[in-house]
């Protein structure tokens, strides 16, 4: 039953992205073009998403289990660190260059848009590089209390 619910929620999310125009890179790039032919309609989509998110998080914080029965898992830290800032900058640059963010890119790729497929492959490659770099750096970093060489 969980898989059916997960599929239905994903389908609803994908349809929402299509209806809102988030899967159209031209619309996204028009929103980001503040000095040119700015399209403010995406601001309404974002405002609606924020309103739904605020309500959903307020409800979720009062629960100990998810609606489908799993445990609620919250981040252990809310610190703004170098990794978060760099990741945000890379995300924003990718969004501004391609007109896609991850969810709409996957929906667009499933709809057969070649540009979206290239974006998703590049996104996955970037995630793999970050994971590999993180593992390499954590292996080379001294553990607390260990003398530096």
Image (tube, rainbow, N blue to C red):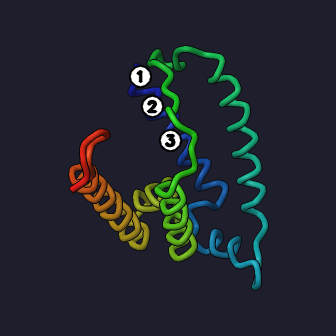
Within 10 Å of disc 3 (Cα), the crowding (few <14, some 14-19, many 20+) is: few
Q: Nearer the viewer, residue 77 or 125?
A: 77
Q: Name above or below for residue 114 compared with residue 128.
A: below
Image marks 3 and 1: residues in contact by CB distance under 8 Å: no
Q: Residue at x 50, y 32 (%)?
A: 76
Q: Quadrant of the N terminus?
A: top left
Q: Residue at x 38, y 63 (%)?
A: 123
Identify the residue under disc 3: 11
Within 10 Å of disc 1 (Cα), the crowding (few <14, some 14-19, many 20+) is: few
Q: Residue at x 51, y 34 (%)?
A: 75
Within 10 Å of disc 2 (Cα), the crowding (few <14, some 14-19, many 20+) is: few
Residue 80 lies, in percent from the top left, at 57, 50
Q: Name above or below for residue 89 compared with residue 53.
A: below
Image marks 2 and 1: residues in contact by CB distance under 8 Å: yes
Q: Residue at x 28, y 59 (%)?
A: 133
Residue 35 lies, in percent from the top left, at 76, 84
Residue 28 lies, in percent from the top left, at 63, 69
Identify the residue under disc 2: 6
Query: Is 28 left or right of 73, judged from the image as shown?
Result: right
Q: Nearer the viewer, mark 3 or mark 1?
A: 1
Identify the residue under disc 1: 2
Query: How far apart are the two marked residues, 3 and 2, measured between alpha carbons?
Result: 9 Å
Marks 3 and 1, the one that precedes in the sequence: 1
Query: Is 75 left or right of 27, judged from the image as shown?
Result: left
């Amino acid at each position: 039953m969980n898989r059916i619910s997960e599929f239905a929620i994903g389908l609803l999310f994908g349809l929402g992205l299509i209806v809102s125009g988030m899967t159209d890179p031209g619309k996204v790039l028009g929103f980001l073009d503040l000095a040119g032919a700015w399209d403010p309609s995406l601001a309404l989509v974002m405002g609606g998403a924020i309103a739904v998110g605020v309500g959903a998080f307020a409800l979720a914080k009062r629960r100990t289990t998810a609606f489908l029965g799993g445990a609620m898992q919250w981040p252990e830290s809310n610190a703004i660190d170098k990794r978060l800032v760099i990741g945000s900058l890379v995300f924003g640059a990718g969004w501004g260059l391609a007109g896609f963010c991850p969810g709409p890119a996957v929906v667009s790729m499933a709809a057969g848009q070649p540009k979206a497929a290239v974006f998703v492959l590049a996104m996955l490659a970037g995630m793999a590089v970050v994971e590999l770099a993180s593992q390499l750096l954590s292996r080379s970093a001294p553990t607390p209390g260990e003398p530096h060489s």
